[in-house]
Image (cartoon, rainbow, N blue to C red):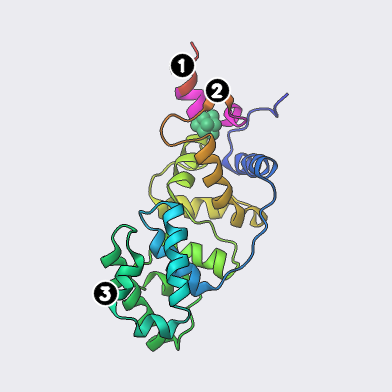
Amino acid sequence: MPPSYRSDPRDKIIIVSKFLEDRYGKVKFKTEDPFDVLIRTIISQRNKDEMTDKTFKRMSSELRSIDDYLSVDSRRLANLIKPSGFYNQKAKMIKKAVKIIKDRYGGELPRTREELMALPGVGGKTADIVLSYGFGENVIACDTHVIWISNAIGLVDSKDPEKVRERLMEITPERYKRMLNIEMVEFGKEICRTSRPKCSVCGLKYICNYYNKVYKKRYER
Ligand code: SF4
């Protein structure tokens, strides 16, 4: 028997977090070099995971330090990023960001969200990924999966990434914050897809607004 239906988002987020942890296991975080996380995340923008992996591996074999990124020719950098999409823009953003990190912060990545977001190519999601994976902070990076799933279940009521983040940060217990992005991405790829979610086989349907208000009426009459 599933637990009784709860509508309070603070109750729901605990049910969701435990469900995801049971399904995908406890996330074993290994903190990575923050600078690598930043470069990798910029490359990953509008890119497939496999392509990001390949591109970053190729770049890392040639560019090993911030000074390597400062000295590399922009065209060479763009070629290393290619065939990932938007390689010219990404190369320009990386070169500008690296210069600021060197000139303003002595070559060390800043540790606040505001300072990270002031770097070229860095929005809220990228800043949160750096804080979480690079600095080990309990923050929630909000990508399309997190935004869709949180709205569908009824944890939040907004498509604005900053508003979604603010609300999730408010209602999520500390111990679940860091894992939420990783596990919602898995869940979003496997079950709760942005287009045609597999609600009929979903273990969260009993608390899900989308299932109860849309899916059930449309497909289970
Ligand atoms: S019931 Fe459907 S919309 Fe709700 S969480 Fe599950 S898959 Fe997503």
Residue 105 in the image: state x and y as whole percent: 44, 86
Q: Earlier in the sequence, mark 3 or mark 2?
A: 3
Q: Alpha-carbon distance for marks 3 and 1?
A: 53 Å
Magenta residue span: 202-214
Checking the image for residue 170, the label placed there is none
Mark 3 lies on residue: 75
Query: Which percent across, then down, holds residue 41?
Result: 44, 63
What predominant SS class does the magenta segment belong to? helix
Residue 6 percent across, percent down from the top left: 62, 32
For label 1, the residue is: 219
Label total for image = 3
Q: Which image quarter: residue 114?
A: bottom left
Circle 2 residues within 10 Å: few <14, some 14–19, many ≥20: some
Q: Residues within 10 Å of mark 3 (few under 14, many from 20)?
A: few
Asked whether the beta carbons under mark 1 and mark 2 sit within 8 Å of each other, the answer is: yes
Q: Are marks 3 and 2 in contact (CB under 8 Å)?
A: no
Residue at the image position 38 percent from the left and 49 percent from the top: 160
Q: Is label 3's Cβ within 8 Å of ligand 1?
A: no
Residue drawn at (50%, 62%) of the image = 129
Q: Secondary structure at mark 1?
A: helix
Pick the quarter of the image with the N terminus. Answer: top right
Residue 200 image label? 2
> Is 204 part of what is drawn in magenta?
yes
Type of the residue with mark 2: Ser
Residue 65 in magenta stretch: no
**Mark 1 burial class by Cα count in 10 Å: few <14, some 14-19, many 20+:** few
Label 3 vs 1, first from the N-terminus = 3
